[in-house]
Amino acid sequence: MNRPHLLDRLIGPGWPDLSTPEAVRTFEATPYADRIAARSTYEALRLGASANPDAPAIRFLPNADPDEAPIVSSHAQCLARVTQAANAFHALGIGRDDVVSFLLPLLPQSLYTLWGAEAAGVANPVNPLLEPYQLVEIMKAADTKVLVVIGPMPGTDIWEKVQTIRAELPSLSAIVAVGGARVATAQPFAAGAKAPVRADDGLAPIFDFDALIAAQRSDGLASGRVIEPDDTAAYFHTGGTTGTPKLVRHTHANQVYQAWVIGLMLRIGREATILAGLPLFHVGGALTTALSWLAAGGCLVIVSPSGWRSPAAQRNVWRIAERYRPAGFGGVPTVLTAALAAPTEGIDLSSIKVAFAGGSAIPVAVGRAYVERFGWPVLEVYGMTETASVHTIAFQDRPLRLGSAGHPVPFSRVRIVKVDANGRCIGDCATDEIGVVAMAGPGCFSGYRSAQHNKDAFVEPGWVNSGDLGRLDAEGYLWITGRAKDLVIRGGHNIDPQPIEEILFGHPAVALAAMVGQPDAYAGELPVAYVQAKPGESVDPNALIDYVRERTPERAAVPVSIHLVDPMPLTGVGKVFKPALRWDAAKRVAARMLADLSLPGLQVDAGAHPVHGSLITVSVEGVPPGERPAIEKTVQERLGPLTIRHEVAWR
């Protein structure tokens, strides 16, 4: 039992050499199917617990305070609670294809729910911050049978949301409340007993989570289920927070691969620790973090119930790291950016050897700040819900290229392809030629729950259409250069422009409207809209923002600004040419960020670039060569936090 990777049958006491493409091919000569030691997420957790059952699996910090006594669950206790949750769901009627949805903050019970639901049937983690009508859409699309939700408590309205939509979910047979004031309407039942079907009011009965699972056996699955790798493990919603969500179907094999490959690439040893702050409705939180560390025999330090959204967690991040000694620090780029502002003086961070992030591009300036300030390599990862999270990563044993998403992880593949109007592959792009990023491998899904969403999901069989534009350089590094899709990614959350555009079109004075992402140093992007007024009409941008705010429940999707344009840039077939609007938004942001500098003849522009996709150009006039390095440094300090590249041109 000296293997460092519990999910790999063949890895010995040392980590394999993956430093060159040839080394990866040698590693891949043994088929993945012969390596993997777990057929399901439940078995992966069991293997993780077997390494040291008494070691901590979860340390939960209710207040994001490094000095508070954490609530600790050992691996044996965690596996027992997952098993009890699975058996409780089975007793509530959940079979292999039945769905358990949950609306929960980051709690130990949330992890028991996720993996217990996958062991009994299908898990459906849902963003509890969505509006009630969106929750109904997602849970109806999943055909939810059991709903697990945080009970009523101060500071959250999740329970109240559920009460407003409870009657709109006809397939719902039970609600299970975690914590909060006592709301249970049904008594816990003994193991093997049949659960009541309906409460006295005709609606689904409500159970208390802790009492419900406590009555169940913890030594094995009461259902006797043998989970197959191709069984559905979970649905994850994607496709934008304001559009009709798509449900991505993950198999157990998809999710186990993510745990296996993250353990391999980040060298997660037994009893390794990670600070966990990403939500479980995000594949980065559920799979890249939670499953990967638990399956490796590691420990999750849950930084707060609201994860990294907690101001205290952001403020105390390095003190928490000092106490719990993680070997790596990761999240989404906004987490890395916020952590740079947290105090480090007098804090011992020597345990951390690497930083990593994904969900959106890491600004090069942020990556450079970690390298220069801490000496940690910053590994950018790339993937999507449809690939069960990470698909490429900057390899630790290869030269670091800040701004690149590295190489495909073992047994996964990336191509840059040309597609036709129907999104079908018509050929591969040359080296450094920009095209659509397509991905294949054990983590890639086979399709959405609803077949109607699969039309543009694959460029050809087995190759997922990412919707992103990118290029592969001569050394095989992947560079993401833009998006073929129109989604605005605000702090790692997807916003579909179409519903906002429809609201704008509904205004009597608006002729044309479009929403795009404006580069932002913190959130990555912010939504901005462009409007062309009807002839003879006038539009007040501020009043138009209020008009949108009154008509959409999704606050994050409301444009931060609206710009009037005439004419709207159009393609040859009359469609809005959104790249021109994105370039204009980038130009406006860069100009504002440089406005207070006394630079002679300053001009800012943005446009297409054959290598970077888009580029901000800062032109300065009449500066002697000796003074140019200082100006370039200042411009870099200002614009470096943006994900879009920039350059200084001298006139």
Image (spheres, rainbow, N blue to C red):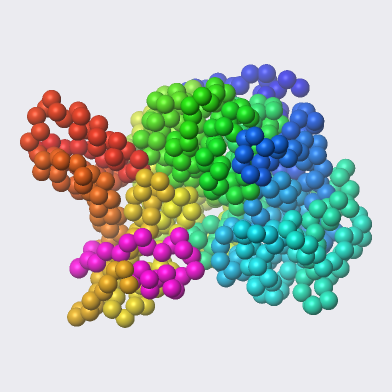
Image coordinates of residue 443 in percent, x first then y, are 59, 43
Does 32 appear above or below 603? above
Q: Give the residue displayed 42% in from the left and 69% down from the top.
A: 549
Does 139 appear above or below 265? below
Q: Splitting the image into 4 quarters, where does residue 60 fall?
A: top right
Image coordinates of residue 626 in percent, x first then y, are 13, 25
Q: Give the residue displayed 69% in from the left and 55% down from the top.
A: 123
Q: Number of callouts in the render?
A: 0
Q: Give the residue displayed 42% in from the left and 57% down from the top.
A: 487
Q: Is residue 553 magenta?
A: yes
Question: Which quadrant of the figure contains the C terminus?
Answer: top left
Q: Is residue 572 left or right of residue 517?
A: left
- Give the residue at the far left of this rendering: 622
Does 309 appear above or below 623? below
Image coordinates of residue 88 in percent, x first then y, are 83, 55
Q: Is residue 509 visible?
A: yes
| Closer to the camera in the image, 513 or 404 | 513
Q: Is residue 200 magenta?
A: no
Q: Splitting the image into 4 quarters, where does residue 535 fall?
A: bottom left
| Closer to the camera in the image, 490 or 393 | 490
User: Where does the magenta region start and end?
Assistant: 544-570
Q: Give the residue displayed 78% in from the left and 28% down from the top.
A: 52
Image coordinates of residue 613 in percent, x first then y, are 30, 45
Q: Is residue 552 left or right of residue 46?
A: left
| Closer to the camera in the image, 626 or 41 | 626
Q: Is residue 477 visible?
A: no
Q: Is residue 453 left or right of residue 183?
A: left
Question: Which quadrant of the figure contains the N terminus?
Answer: top right
